[in-house]
Image (tube, rainbow, N blue to C red):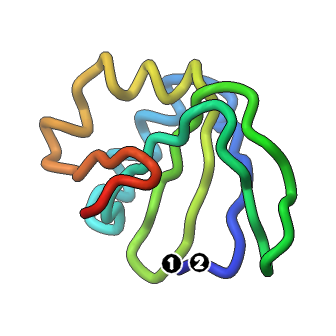
Amino acid sequence: MAKHFDDTDFGSSKALLAHIKERSDDLEKVVIIPPGSRRVYRSRTEAVVGEWQMMLCMIGDKRSVIGQVDARMLLCDGILDRMGIKIEMLGEDA
């Protein structure tokens, strides 16, 4: 599990899609984070999630979190499915 993760703003949907395509070999899975989830770091709650988010889980434990608008765009675009990227819900048994 990653030691920490960052909220990531790619600046535009086009930039986010380009990042996903460029790093597709490194993208292990995405995890959908529902509102009300707690973000914990070193056994301490950092925040309570207020809206849907998505965590991009890269090989090597690097993680980035994107907001609801970008997460919805990725899901609706279908790029994750076309690339065969696994999509999980937080807390789902894999």
Q: Which mark is residue 2?
A: 2
Q: Is residue 86 above or below residue 14?
A: below
- The residue carrying mark 1 is 61
Q: Quadrant of residue 32?
A: top left
Check disc 2 and report its element: helix, strand or loop.
Answer: loop
Decide: is 11 above or below 65: above
Residue 27 image position (x, y, % from top left): 35, 61
Q: Is residue 73 above or below residue 59?
A: above
Locate residue 54, reporting x and y percent.
52, 41
- The residue located at (43%, 19%) in the rendering is 73
Q: Nearer the viewer, residue 12 or 5?
A: 5
Q: Going by the image, does 89 lie left or right of 71?
A: left
- What kind of residue is marked 2? Ala
Secondary structure beneath dot 1 equals loop
The structure residue drawn at horizontal position 53% and vertical position 80%, both measured from the top left corner, is: 1
Going 32% across and 48% down the picture, which residue do you hit?
88
Q: Are marks 2 and 1 in contact (CB under 8 Å)?
A: yes
Q: Earlier in the sequence, mark 2 or mark 1?
A: 2
